[in-house]
Image (cartoon, grey):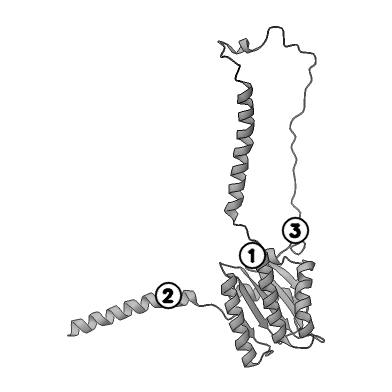
Amino acid sequence: MKKRCFSVLMLLLLCLALVLPAAAADAHPPRVVDDGGWFTQTEFDDLTAKLDALSEELDFDLVVVTTDYDLGDGDASYADEYFDQNGYGMNGNDGMLLLIYPTDGAPGAFISTSGKGVKVYPAGDEEVGSKFSAAIRPTLNDFDAYSASLAFADTAKALVKDYHFIPVYFYFIAIALGAILAFAIPLNHYRSQLKTVRSQAAAGDYIRKDSFKLTQQRDIFLYHTVTRTERPKDNDSSGSRTSSTGNSHGGGRV
């Protein structure tokens, strides 16, 4: 009896050991963090459900974070670091975070993008930024952070779906096919021109007698050495910023 109980107990412990790592792996940080107290409980729950569903649908994290600090020019750094330090990002780091914070006037808002999100909304992209501003600002200026967050989610969904992400291996396939065609077409052309050529005993037999005459001779300079020194890059102008973790971010103030 004791042996049977011991066996059952060991079996239960083994099952628990297998389940707990899987549950931990599935754990995800909350996609709505209302440190600034901008949402009611109902709004918080509804927004969380919407962002969770969209993130799974798009395989792309959509996150909303609020704070009660006036971040000023530090909003970009705060949003980037919050995204990285709290483990957001599908497939490693694909995602987009809306940060809402108070100012002396209308609430401030900054969108940080990561991974594929940088392609959707690169740093300083005024065209994409204007789309988010048009969606978010009308309600955010009235201090309605909930409606602004819903508009952010809908706009992000449309932009992510419209952006066609091409897998990296497609580029290698295209390069390989291009190389094959570039080699095969001229080869077939020259083969067709050589149908009348017969094999000769020596290389010199392929040259017609007295057909070669040297009329001019000159030296041609073929190579030179250039030393280049890399100039420091401006992250904003290159379409991304780099956080303290080394992750690249896009987006901007809206």
Q: Residue 114: which quarter of the image?
A: bottom right
Image quarter (top left, top right, bottom left or bottom right) of the C terminus: bottom right
Q: Which of marks 1 and 2 is nearer the N terminus?
A: 2
Residue 156, quarter of picture: bottom right
Give me the disc on residue 233: 3
Can you name the residue that lies furthest to the top here? Answer: 209
**Tag 2 and tag 3, C-beta contact below 8 Å:** no
Disc nearer the start of the sequence (2/3): 2
Residue 217 image label: none
x 62%, y 24%: residue: 192
Q: Quadrant of the N terminus?
A: bottom left
State the residue position of label 2. Answer: 21
In the picture shown, does residue 199 fall above or below 165? above
Q: Within 10 Å of the Cα at label 3, are there few (<14), some (14-19), or many (20+) other Cα atoms?
A: few
Asked if one can make out residue 180 in the rendered structure from this viewpoint, the answer is: yes
Would residue 143 appear left or right of 192 to someone viewing this image? right
Q: Mark 1 points at which residue?
A: 116
Q: Distance between the residues labelled 2 and 3?
A: 42 Å
Amino acid at dot 1: Lys
Residue 52 percent location from the top left of the image: 58, 79
Circle 1 or circle 3, nearest the eye = 1
* Residue type, label 3: Lys
